[in-house]
Image (cartoon, rainbow, N blue to C red):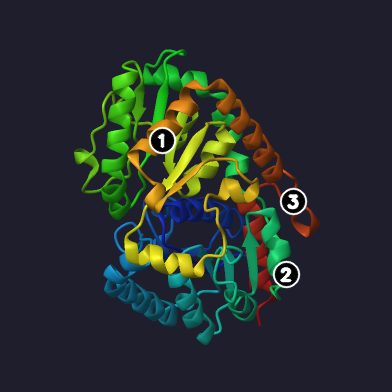
Amino acid sequence: MRNNRQKIWISAGEISGDEYGANLALALKEKFPSCELAGMGGSNMRAAGVRTHIDCESTAATMGFAEVLRKASGLYAALSRLGSEMKKNKPNLLITIDFPDFNFRLIKKARKLAIPCLYFITPKVWAWREKRCSFLSEKLSACAVIFPFEEDFLRKRGVKNCYFVGHPLAESLPKIKQDRTKIRERLGIGQNQKLLAIFLGSRESEIKRHYPILKDSAERLTAKYPDLLIAAPLAKNNLTEKIKFPNQINLKDFSSIEILSAADAGLIKSGTSNLQAALLGTPFAMFYKVNQLTAVIARLLINRSDFSIVNILYPESAPEYVQENCTSAKLYDAAEKLLFNDVCRSQQLAKFAKITEILSQGVTGEFRHFKGVYQRVAELASRIINSAP
């Protein structure tokens, strides 16, 4: 057996990737009890025992072409340092999580050192930049994907070692959904009192762009419905103390998942939280706004008219307000319907039930006997390491 003294790197560049990386680290430790874990990540991965050469919370997390340009020097410095560390202390395997513009370059460095690579949560090549499939086919030992349609999509485009391992959220959220009443009691909210969750985003650039729009929507809503409460969870950053909504409740010691579960409806920026809301059965409208340069480039490259993953999994599940449609008036109207129109709410919840059904389908094939997404990825990692020359 070659399963004990292994060096495994994990590279995650986003807050959500850091959470996935932390859970994966715990599964890897079960599979390889004496393994050394290192790479790029944040506080969650460090708490799980990963030695992070680069802190993704301060260096890597960014989105949009202009935002990437502004952080380019820091990203290149991080890439250079990780490359040097890999060369000095060569790992048995590199596992990359999402964040493709950075991780593709890191994979190239790893392959020059003959380090096998596993991609967990592959880039969204089904939405844009399909040509990246050739890179995935040529450079990777395997891909572990989290949406059922991705395995078929990638295999048809030459990515043969591609496996659907299940979606982490489909496994973790059902219990929290059952705890809604208890969470509202802890928040001090009456069961008949309306709560609107507003998710501005995790990056400072997102928060700065979205806050004035959402604040105006919230002010109009609370003026008409004085008993309406607002929950606006934020990642810790320089803007946290400056974000103030009317009727805003104290969220200390409450996770964003708990807030979504407790809320009657949400106004939520595009991203992982969209799927979280759907699986928790919280009606929501999606919004997103970027600077004009990013918008122009994105429209040239993206081959989809819908952006939220819930609408990709099941069409027309949630309304989308993107770019010029992301206005305070439209978001006010959307929130009012989702909070107070029972027909609108029930129609959306019926579609969310379909999404839950899609993602809850069992994993087939050789990984069906392994319980849990992260255990399946750890098993795939084990097979790659043990087959390496």
Q: Quadrant of residue 346?
A: top right
Side of 28 where 236 appears, left or right: left
Q: Which residue is mark 1?
A: 255
Name the foreground residue: 126 vs 185.
126
Q: Amino acid at mark 1?
A: Ser
Amino acid bearing label 3:
Val
Q: CA distance from mark 3 to mark 1?
A: 29 Å
Residue matched to label 3: 363
Q: Secondary structure at mark 1?
A: loop
| 3 or 1: tag closer to the N-terminus | 1
Circle 2/circle 3 CB separation < 8 Å: no
Give the answer, above or below, for where 337 lies relative to 50: above
Q: Residue at x 73, y 72 (%)?
A: 160
Residue 246 in view here? yes
| Few, some or many residues within 10 Å of mark 3 (<14, 14–19, 20+) | many
Give the side of residue 37 with respect to residue 167, left or right: left
Q: At numbered mark 3, what does the secondary structure look like: helix, strand or loop?
A: loop
**How many numbered circles are shown?**
3
- x, y percent for residue 23: 52, 50
Name the side, left or right, on which 227 lies relative to 97: left
Image position, residue 164 (x, y; %): 69, 57
Q: Quadrant of residue 223?
A: top left
Q: x and y percent of residue 193 in the render? A: 42, 15
